[in-house]
Amino acid sequence: MYDSDESSSRRALLGTAAGSLAALAGCTSALPSMGGSSNDGGDTPSGSDSNDGASSGTSLLYASDETTKFDVDLEGNPLMGSADAPLDVYYWTDYQCPFCKKFEQNTLPKLVDDYIEPGKLRMVVMENPYIGQASETAARMSKCVWRTVRDENPDAFKRWHATIFDEQGKENSGWAKEKNLLEITRGVSGVDAGAVESCMNEETKAVKASVDADVQAAKSNDIRGTPAFIFFDRESEKAGKIVGAQPYSLFEKAIRKVDNA
């Protein structure tokens, strides 16, 4: 990652609003080890057909082996949107975080409609599992699901991702243990649960390394909670940060501020 001097200039925060709301709208590291209103995107699940690239015949999800100017290695991370989008948003999540579920259901669909699908914004899905061991298990399974579908059926990852949040239980209650996650996976169209299980058992080192890289990127950017977002202009290299399931209007403000730098 960039050194601390570069971080201060390239990763300027968007102001105090996002930080002051984070404790109320996000899972933070103080907790034990995708909230909106009808004006913030409604309650449409992120896996709905209206936001699935397959509905228009073109997938919004794809894989890449590039390293961005923000020094994020994209190999192993699902990307949603146009490869030519001028802005990136790096999205760190924990599948056990209830505020991540709120973001997924209330705000993500509107971001897809207004910015991702039109080619203005590209989202990179990243992991930051810290609520408990089950968070780590879910993060590794997410990586395995992506590995099994990215070449031939990338949209299946979006269905799996949305389904896991739909099935989210109480933190550290056991709902995200590997056995239960695999059972949920068997019900997701386009995802081979057997192949995912094999990946979990046989590609443990590589998958762990991918999760660890995401966690290190979060630490390097002083991200201590989920959901967390860094918006990055790929040309000007201007960046801004939001932490928490904030109102959609704050996401719009962040995008405008970075895009107009």
Image (cartoon, rainbow, N blue to C red):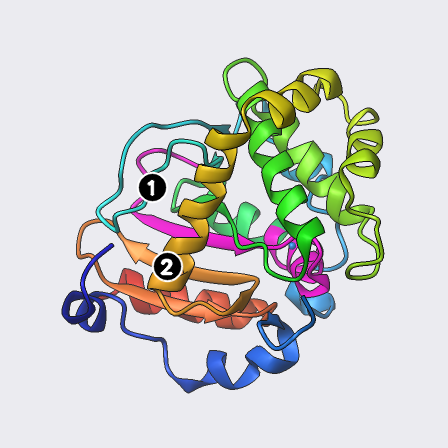
Label 1: element kind? loop
How many numbered marks, from 0 up?
Answer: 2
Quadrant position of residue 40: bottom right
Q: Relative to 211, is 56 above or below?
A: above
Q: Which class describes the residues within 10 Å of circle 1: few (<14), some (14-19), or many (20+)?
A: some
Task: State the quadrant of the N terminus.
Answer: bottom left
Question: Residue 27 at what x, y percent from top left?
Answer: 63, 69
Instruction: Give the camera-side residue of 249 and 204.
Output: 204
- Residue 85 within the magenta-colored segment of the rendering: yes
Name the residue rendered at 56%, 28% in the picture: 146
Name the residue rendered at 38%, 31% in the picture: 75
- Give the labeled residue for mark 2: 231
Q: Which mark is residue 185?
A: none
Q: Is residue 160 left or right of residue 61?
A: right
Say whether disc 2 or disc 1 marks the residue closer to the N-terminus: 1
Q: Which mark is residue 85?
A: 1
User: Which three-letter amino acid code belongs to the residue tagged 2?
Assistant: Phe
Q: Is residue 94 left or right of residue 240?
A: right
Q: Is residue 55 visible?
A: no
